[in-house]
Every structure is written in structure tokens, then in C-alpha cells.
Image: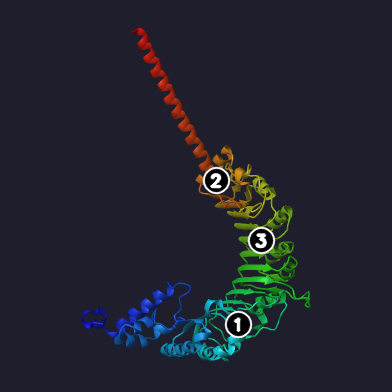
Amino acid sequence: MNHVHDPMHKLPPEIVSRVFTVCMHATWENRRPHDALLNPVPRATIPPLLFGAVCQRWREIAWSTPQLWTKLNIYLDPSICGWQTKVAQEWLARSGSLHLSIHLRPRHEQDLSYHTNLFAPLMRLLSEHSPRWKHLNIALPHSFMTHFRGDLQGIPVLQTMVINGKSVFPLGSQGEESLHFGQEASSLVSVEIYSYRFRSIGIGWKHVTTVHLSKLFVEECLELFQVASSMRECNIALVTQADDTELPVHHHVISDSLENLAIGFVNSLDGPALMNNITLPRLQSLSYYVSAIDSLSPFFSRSSSTLTRLLLSENDASEVELIQLLYSTPFLQALDLYHMDLENQLLDHLVSTALSTIDREGNKHGFLPHLAELSLLGEGDYSLDTLPMIFAQGHLLPNQAMRPWEKMEIAFFVDPEEEYLGQDLLNKLLEIIDRGIKLLLFNTETDNDLIKVSQQYYESLDAEDGEEADDDGDSDAEDENVKEEYSEGEDQ
């Protein structure tokens, strides 16, 4: 490079280093999903390697700026494993003693389980720096974890952990390789682990606030609620009961910190086994998938929480059972019902209970008096004629109130040839929308918004009527002209 025309050459090294650092972080934040700082093809295409390819001065500054080397992203490729290990060693050395963000995953999602020994040196190299791990995101075969583990003293600066075992195992299996990260994890707040049994995860849970796990037994869920005493958000998929395990009656867990719980079960009988054994007094949001709801009402009553959001999906409860359950959630503000066999009983009940009463302390009483958002997504067969009555306005007594509606979304099957709403119903729904309420009615068959397509349909009819009226007017004018010409001819 011509130093005379290089403005960077005139800057002191510390300024150039700062510029490099800013560029590096911008590149990392805006990277494409398939970018990798250690590209499987050994070429310098991404900072900081790109900086070093410009000139010797840039290389010296980049190589001596530890902040440029704190993010290590490797797409593991057996064909260049030796090169990746060598570059990773140099990379980590240049990072000094700074905290590290490490991302590891297979190249092209290939199965690396047959290459465990080949990658063992790289795994051990990364493990040597575990006291400096700050963010960890890895997708590796279980066999790799024999070599990839934390320091015996723990992982004191690790904040977030995402681990995917990249293996499919039966729900009943127990023989997965263990994750060894030490019990000292004072900074760890977010844990996301898939394809590992809970009891095979060796970390300290005390300070963790956010948890995402899958394929747990009911008793493992209860154990999690016990040991993760700071947990505020929990998402667990595919929960089931162990065939050979029967929970003791007294095995009840109270979690005083959990606010948001999303949990999915393998079958409808698994839910009660868990919900009958937990109490969550601070729960604000519950997403509940694939299970019977009969255990939820006692759970809500026992927890006495101010639940404000509820999602129910894929259960066979009747609408009568659903309405009875919702009476136990008086503070609910948002309700989502997915893939349930619903017709009009819930909507009709919302009409008949549109008014709530207000006591002297200002508390509302009635059926879902605080409900502002409702989503019904599935194959329900709804009659929409009474829908506007849910939002009806009128004179209220001082001790009466309407629901504070903000949004309603209903998605259901409609024959594409019959998806136009009646003109009167459409006008009423448009008036509701004009009041600032977001109202969406979708046809699951066509994904059309029934309100929009109906608007367009009637506008097109009006346009056609207008054109016909214009044509009739032109015809009448022509007839008058002919008459006038005929009259003038007779006069002559």
C-alpha cells in the first residue's frame, strides 16, 4: 500500500486498533448465518484475518489487539481439522486473557460422531480456556463432550450456554454422555440444551434465570424447579413420565421465582403428573401444549398467581370445560387457543358476559374482565354474526365496565367460494376496527384476511355498478339526441 495515500498510516496504533475493533464488532453483528471467522476454506475473508492481509503495519496492529480475537466461530470440517486446530490455537493466544464467545458446529450439518478422536485435540484446546468462556453455542455429537468440558473449578464468567447434542435418542434412554462444566457458574443466566438428559448436565443452576430444555421426565422437571431457584423463564418440550417411576405423593415443589412457563407433553396424561406437583405463585404466563387441562384449575387456585397470559394448544377439552377453567384466571389479559375443537360457545359466552362489575376498591369481577387479546387458531367452525356484540358499546352504570379489547384474531376453515362476509356484518366489523381494535379473520385454506377480501369484493361491485350507471346515462343522452334530431327533421 502507498503510505502517502493511506490515511490510516498517519494515525497512532491505538486509534487504528480502536477502528479495527469497531469494524470487527459491526462485522460480527451483521454476519450471515453461514459466515465463519474460521472459514473451512483457509483464506482471509473476514476480519480480523482480513486486516492482517492488507499490509505489515495493519497486521502488526491487528495481531496485537486482543479485542479482535474474542469471538471464535468454527464450522468443523474433518478434511482440514489439523489446520483449524492450529489456527484456533493462534487465535486464542492473540485474545490474551479476555473473555471468549465460542461457536462450534459441523460443516454442512454432517455427522461428526465418527471423527471424535480426530477433533479431540481441538476440543481439549478449547477446554483449556474454559475459565474465559463468556458465551457458548455448540452443536456437537455427544461423544465430543468427553473432551469438551469446563474447568474443575467451574466456569465463573460464562453467561449464556446453548448446546445441541446433535443426536436423536429415545425418550426413555439414560446413557447419554455427561456435560461436565463444574458447579461454580456464578455468572450463568441463560441455559439452552437439547438432546441431553437433565441429570447428565453438570452445571451450577443457582443463578440461571432462563432455561430451554427438551425430552425430560416429569421427575426431572421437578428437580429443575428445585435447583434453579432464580429461574424466571422456562421452556421445556417433550415432557413424559418414566415408565418405571412413580412420584411420591409428598413430592411437591414450590418455585417462588418462575414467571413464564412454556411446557409441552408427549401425551395428554403427562401434564397432570407435573401440574399436580408444582405451585408457582409468581407465574404470569403459561403456554401448555398437548395435555389434558383438568389439572390446571387446581394448579391456578393453589398458586394464586396473577396469570396474565395463557396459551393452550392441542388438547381435547370441551368448550364447557374450557369456560370453567377460564373462570379460575380472572386477571387474564391475553388468551391464545390453538388447534382445539371449538365452535361458538366461548364466543357466545363472551357476548353474554361482556359487562363486568366494579367493587368499591376498583376491582373488576366477571368472566375474563381484563381480557384485551384473543387468538383462536385452528379448524373451528365459527358463526361470526354475533361477533360484533362482543365489542358492543352502550351506556354503562358507574359500577360496570367493558373488556379493554385491543386485538382479536380468528383463523378457521372457510370454503374459498364463501369467504365473503355479509355487507352488514362487514360494516359492523369495520366500525370496530375504526375504534382502534385490531381485528383479523383468516381463512386457513387460503390464508386470506376475510375482512380485506370482503372489502375488495364489495368495492369491486360498487365500481361495476358505477360503470353500469355511467353506461345507462350515456345511453339516455344518446336517445335524447336522436329524439331532438328527429324532431328537427319533422319541423323542416
Q: Which residue is label 3 attached to?
A: 313
Answer above or below: position of 164 versus 485.
Answer: below
Chain-order first, disc 3 or disc 1? 1
Q: Secondary structure at mark 3?
A: strand
Q: Residue 429, how many percent across, how many down?
A: 56, 43
Q: Residues within 10 Å of mark 3 (few under 14, many from 20)?
A: some
Disc number at residue 451? 2
- As drawn, which residue projects farthest toward the left? 4
Q: Secondary structure at mark 1?
A: loop
- Mark 1 residue type: Pro
Between disc 2 and disc 1, the foreground one is: 1
Q: Secondary structure at mark 2?
A: helix
Between disc 3 and disc 1, the foreground one is: 1
Answer above or below: position of 137 versus 323.
Answer: below
| Residue 68 occupies quadrant | bottom left
Chain-order first, disc 3 or disc 2? 3
Query: In which quadrant is the N terminus drawn?
Result: bottom left
Is 295 on the left or on the right of 48, as rendered? right
Disc number at residue 359? none
Q: Residues within 10 Å of mark 2 (few under 14, many from 20)?
A: many
State how far apart marks 2 and 1 are (Cα): 50 Å
Which residue is at the front of the view, 358 or 156? 156
Colour scheme in use: rainbow
Answer above or below: position of 62 versus 336.
Answer: below
Q: Image point 54% across, 43% down: which residue?
A: 454
